[in-house]
Image (spheres, rainbow, N blue to C red):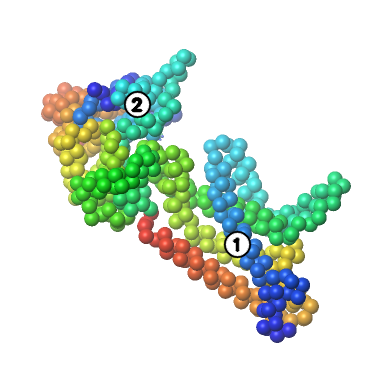
Amino acid sequence: MNILSMENIKKSFGSNEVLKDISFKVNKGEVVSIIGTSGGGKSTLLRCATLLETIDDGTITYMGEDVTYYDQNGKLCYAKDLNHFKKFFGLVFQNFNLFPHFSVLKNVMDAPVTVLKRDREEVKKECLELLDKMGLADKATAYPCELSGGQQQRVSIVRALAMKPDILFFDEPTSALDPELTGEVLKVIKALADEKMTMVIVTHEMAFARAVSDRVVFIDGGVILEQGTPEEVFVNTKNERTRQFLQNYNS
Amino acid sequence: MDISTLIKHLWLTPQGNMPILGTVYIFFLTLIISLPLGIIVALLRLSKVKVISYIVQFFISVLRGTPLMLQLMVVTYGPSFIAKQFGYNLSMPEKLIPVVIAFSINYAAYFAEIYRGGIESVPRGQYEAAEVLGYSKSKTFIRIILPQVIKRIVPSVTNEVITLVKDTSIAFTVSYVELFTEVKRIAISHSTFMPFIVAGVFYYIFNFLVTVAMGKVEKSLSYYRI
Ligand SMILES: Nc1ncnc2c1ncn2[C@@H]1O[C@H](COP(=O)(O)OP(=O)(O)O)[C@@H](O)[C@H]1O
Ligand SMILES: [Mg+2]
C-alpha cells in the first residue's frame, strides 16, 4: 500500500519554479533516500509532504485519503481537517527544533498528551522506553541545552516516533552535527530501518544511503532525474548528471 | 514637621488619604492590566490583516510619542470636558480610575513593542516543529512560543517596571493623592526640603525591591538556555 503518494507536484516561490511536476510514492515499510545538489528542491518536497508548504498544483494522498483535491472550478484545495493527516507523518529537522523550555521527557511527551489527548501515564511509559532504546534513558530530565547535537537529534527522533507516525521524514538529519556525532544518529535511523519503519531521508551521507535504502531518488533542478535501488543509482547509473554528482561527492 | 510625623502623614493624612498606598495602587494596578493587555496589542500589531496592524501601529506610536502626563490629562479631564460640550455635567469619578487607565494604556504600548520583539525573535523552526506535531495555533503560542518570549524579554520588562515606579509621581499633575503629590504640597506649605529627600529614599527602596524581585524571576527562568 502507498502510505504517501504525491503526483505531478508543482511548487514555485515567486517566479522560481522549485518543484517541476514531481511524482513521488512511498510504500509501507520502504526506506527511501533522497539525494541531490543543494537548491535542487529536496527540502521543499519534504515541506510540501509535511504540509509546511502548500503546493501549487498536483495531488497529495496519505493512506489513500486525499489531502488535496480540485473543486468544481478546477481550483486546488486542501482538505479541511489537516490535523487528521498530520497523525500519519513525522518530520525530523536538520537543526532539531527541540523545545528549549521543556525537559527531554516533556519534549517527547507533550504532543501525544496535549495534541492526541492520550493518557499521560501510558505515554510516559512509552516515551521512557523509546528514550531508553535510543540510549537516552539518563537524559529524560535534562534540558536540550545540556545535550550534544547528536543527543538532541536522537531526542527529536523520539519526539517524532512518540506520535506513532506511519511515515517519518528526515531532512538532512546529520548535516548540523559535528562529524564525530553523525554516527550515533545514523545508527538510530538504521535501527528503525531494520524494524521496517517507513522513512524518507534527505541526506548527503552516501555510504549510509546506500546501506539502508530500498530506493534512492536523485533530485536535481526540481525534477526526479533518476531513481532505483542503491545498486542501480550508486553503481550502475546511466544518468550523466547523477554520475557527475556522485563523482563530486567521492572526490 | 519632624521626619516620623512626616512619614506617618504620608501613610495616612489627617484628611484620611493614604499617599504611599496611592503610589503602590497605581504601580500594581498598572502592571496587572498592562502586562496582559500588551500581549493582545502585540498580537494585533503582528496581525496578518494589514489594516489592523497599521491602526495598532499608529496608536502605539502616538502613545510612545507623546508625554504620559498629557495622556493622563486627556483621560482624566477629557470625558467631563466633552460631556460639557453636549450640555451634560459629569461628576468626577474616583481619580484612581483615570490614572490607572492612562498608565495602563501607555505601558501596554511599551510592553507590546517588547513582546513583539520577543515573539519575532523565536526561530521559525519552533513554529514548524509544533505545526508538524499537530499543535493548534493557540496551543503553539501558549505552550511553545510565549514561555520562550517571556524568558527573552524579562530584562527589558524590568527596565520598564523601574520606569513605572518613578512615573507614578506624574499622577500629581491631576492631583491624585499619591506620594509625590503630598510631598510637594507639604514641602511648599512648610517651606522644607526634607519631604523630597524622604520621597527620593522611598522611590529608591521601591525600585531596589523591584530589581530584586525581577532578578528572582530571571533566575527562575535560567534553568534552560535558548
Ligand atoms: N521559503 C522560500 N522562499 C523562497 N524561496 C525558497 C524558499 N524555500 C526554498 N526556496 C528556494 O527553492 C529552491 C530549492 O530549495 P530547497 O528545497 O531548500 O533545496 P534543497 O533542500 O534541495 O537544498 C532554492 O532555490 C531555494 O532558494
Ligand atoms: Mg535542504
Please tell me which residue lies in front, B11 or B211. Answer: B11
Residue A106 visible to an observer of this rendering: yes
Please tell me which residue lies in front, B75 or B94. Answer: B94
Q: Which mark is residue A19?
A: 2
Q: Is residue A1 above or below residue A120?
A: above
Q: Chain of mark 2?
A: A
Residue corresponding to mark 1: B28
Lateral position of residue A31 relative to residue A5, left or right: left
Q: Secondary structure at mark 1?
A: helix
* Residue under the point 42% across and 18% down: A70
Say which amino acid is labelled 2. Answer: Leu
Q: Classify 10 Å Cα crowding around label 1: few (below 14), some (14-19), many (20 and above).
A: some
Query: Disc count in the image?
Result: 2
* Residue under the point 54% across and 44% down: B43
Pick the quarter of the image with the N terminus of chain B.
Answer: bottom right
Where residue B121 appears, as percent x and y from the top left, is 45, 49
Q: Classify 10 Å Cα crowding around label 2: few (below 14), some (14-19), many (20 and above).
A: many
Lateral position of residue B59 relative to residue B143, left or right: right
Lateral position of residue B213 relative to residue A176, left or right: right
Q: Is residue B170 above or below residue B124?
A: below
Camera-near label (1 vs 2) is 1
Lateral position of residue A225 relative to residue B96, left or right: left
Q: Quadrant of ligand 1?
A: top left
Pick the quarter of the image with the C terminus of chain B.
Answer: bottom left
Dots 1, 2 in contact, CB < 8 A: no
* Residue under the point 49% across and 61% down: B155
Residue A44 visible to an observer of this rendering: no
Most extreme residue toward the right is: B87
1 and 2 marks on the same chain: no
* Residue under the point 70% across and 57% down: B97
Q: Secondary structure at mark 2?
A: strand
